[in-house]
Image (cartoon, rainbow, N blue to C red):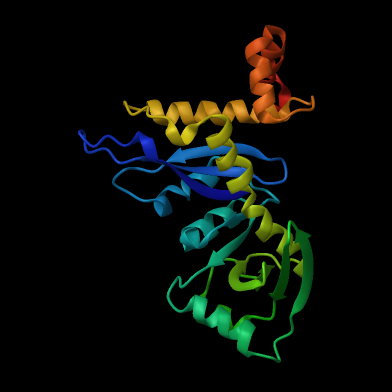
Amino acid sequence: MALDGKTRRRSFDRAAGQSPLHLVSAWAAEQRLVLGQVAVDGKSNEITAVPPLPALLSLQGTIVTADARHCQRAVAEQVIAQGGHDVLALQGNPGTLHEDVRHLLDASPSLPTATHTTLEKEQGRIETRTSVVASEIAWLQEQHHWPGLAAIGKITRTRDMSQQASTETAYYLLSTSLSAERFGQVARQHWGSENSLHWVLDVTRNEEQARGRKDHGPEKLALRRRWALNVARLEPSKGSIKGKRKRAGWNNDYLTQLLAQFAAPHMQ
């Protein structure tokens, strides 16, 4: 389950001093479904909005992923208390933890690690992804006492395209010692929310241009868009999300079939 935020940029109201609506969604990466959402208080920020969201869901045996802004003790504690595991990205936070993790994985050749590499070629681009996991981290945990910390990891991505190459490395905290291969899969699935949720909402539902502003209207409409996306994905016939939307507008029987899924057991 990926925790990720999205701003409804057109929902701002300059005259009323109202900021754009920012929503944090819980995204089931493998099922490609939205499990829940919370709106960020205009006087708060996304970090404080995240802990209440996992509390609404059953996390037993679930791996929860989040980007660096959500790498907070409160998030880790919440996930572990509910029987889940977390894979949290690090980026200069919190305190010296990021630097210590980087040092252990990059400058400690004696540290036992597991490694897995994948190579993908697509449309003239070659991408190499190397995942590294280390679980012998007693010294790190003694220094930082991070909730449930069981392993640390890093992923190095190298892209070669049109005779240009770029490399970036991301570091992670894990509350369960995954294999290097599984760790790489989990970290990559987190970003599926950008392509399979946010991009689809903007393209098929034109969410980025929606200008609803009054009261709780923007939040409620955003929730209904996500419900509609869920039922379209759960409906087993072949076709794109955009195609199913058009079909529902043309065929009342198909529309009824989609809406009937709200009463189905998997939607309870």
Q: Which residue is painted at 53% across and 49% down in the image?
A: 4
Q: Is residue 181 left or right of residue 65?
A: right
Q: Is residue 202 left or right of residue 118?
A: left
Q: Is residue 47 left or right of residue 199?
A: left
Is 184 in front, or is 14? 14
Residue 142 seen in render: no
Q: Is residue 62 left or right of residue 44?
A: right
Residue 51 seen in render: yes
Please say if 253 is above or below 110.
above
Is 195 in front, or is 103? 195
Q: Which residue is painted at 69% across and 91% down in the image?
A: 109
Q: Residue furthest top?
A: 252
Q: Which residue is painted at 66% across and 11% down in the image?
A: 250
Please say if 78 is above or below 163.
above
Please say if 194 is above or below 160.
above
Is 37 in front, or is 211? 211
The quadrant where residue 18 appears:
top left
